[in-house]
Amino acid sequence: MANLRVSYVGTGGNAQGHLRRLSSMEGVEIVACCDVIEERAQASAENYGGKAFVDWRRMLDSVETDACYFSLPPFAHEGAETEAASRGIHIFVEKPVCTDMETGLATKEALDKSGALSCVGYQTRYNRFLNAVREFVKDKTIGMAVTERWGGIAGGPAHWWRVMDKSGGMLHEQATHQLDMLRFCAGDVSEVYALHALRINNEQENHDIPDAEVVTLQFASGAVGYITTTSALIRGGGGSRVELIVEGHLRVQYSGNSSRILPESAGPIPEYEEPLPDSIDRAFIEAIRQGDPSIVKSDYTDGLKTCAVTIAALESAASGKPVAVHPVE
């Protein structure tokens, strides 16, 4: 079998883990590395192979590629994925996939038309403990589903993460992982109501994102829930969890590499026995090789559904009103 040719758009810190894993896989060839910082693109090309580019259009026009990774900040999702998908190139897109629904829906439409496969970087969906929770609750009535992501500020004073117009804040850019876990276990969200505040991090340089966010969630199933975030814990003490209240009067909890049921007398959550890829990159590559999109647990359509929730929440916080989540079919 010929090598699977893979290109990269965005070769910063996030991309390096993907590049390392793929470069160690047999039958995978890195053919191009593109970044707006030329030195960074060149260094990645030297380390992992392929040609270096600063313009993704030129890269797509001049290098034959089967799949392309897009490891970009939220504000930089401006058409590259749509163009690649329209050419039939399989795409891997880091979360969140966009900052506006118009961009996300254009990429989804291109994928639907071309038939290219896709994967979004929600790696926790390949965690055995989270899958055990999902399997345990899948046939049970869920009354409430809640999650949180409490931590500090990403990057230094010049980092784009601190700027609302570039990152969308903690909820949209980082806590999207926790929200996606909630969707993975409890299903789609139909409406949100959000409150934001900036009261603790006021003295931080180049910083205008909320340091506290509370979003109530109405699930399509009828369940209710919420997500809370903070970036005020710059001295440490952060953490996250996912918790579900389900029939049988049970609390089902997931946190990192553990899961449990309360009360403990209800017994443990049965282990998840289905095989799982050893990484999200393996899932994407094997889906392409086998022509089996089911190997990927979060394709672009699913990733866009998670993104639609946080986009609606940002709109709700700005308007002070509940907002319906844009449907993604």
Image (cartoon, rainbow, N blue to C red):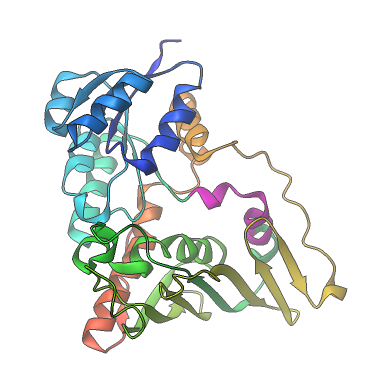
Is 323 one of the magenta-colored residues? Answer: no
Q: Magenta segment range?
A: 123-134
- Tell me residue 182's x, y (percent): 52, 66
On the rendered structure, is 66 left or right of 274? left
Is 298 or 253 nearer to us in this picture?
Answer: 253
Q: Is residue 186 above or below residue 274?
A: below
Instruction: Name the side, left or right, on which 164 lies relative to 193.
Output: left
What secondary structure do most residues of the magenta stretch adopt? helix
Q: Position of residue 118 (x, y in %)?
A: 37, 40
| Res 320 visible | yes
In which quadrant of the rendered view does residue 55 lie?
top left
**Which corner quadrant holds the C terminus?**
bottom left
Q: Is residue 260 left or right of residue 47?
A: right
Q: Residue furthest bottom?
A: 320
Q: Is residue 276 above or below residue 6?
A: below
Say whether residue 219 is visible: no
| Percent of width and height locating residue 190 | 39, 75
Instruction: Single out the residue that lies furthest toward the top.
Output: 1
Q: Which x, y percent locates residue 120?
A: 40, 47
Residue sitting at x 38%, y 65%:
153
Q: In which quarter of the view is residue 257 placed?
A: bottom right
Q: Nearer the viewer, residue 79 or 213?
A: 213
* Residue at x-position 63% and y-position 57%: 130
Q: Residue at x 46, y 10 (%)?
A: 1
Number of numbered callouts drawn = 0
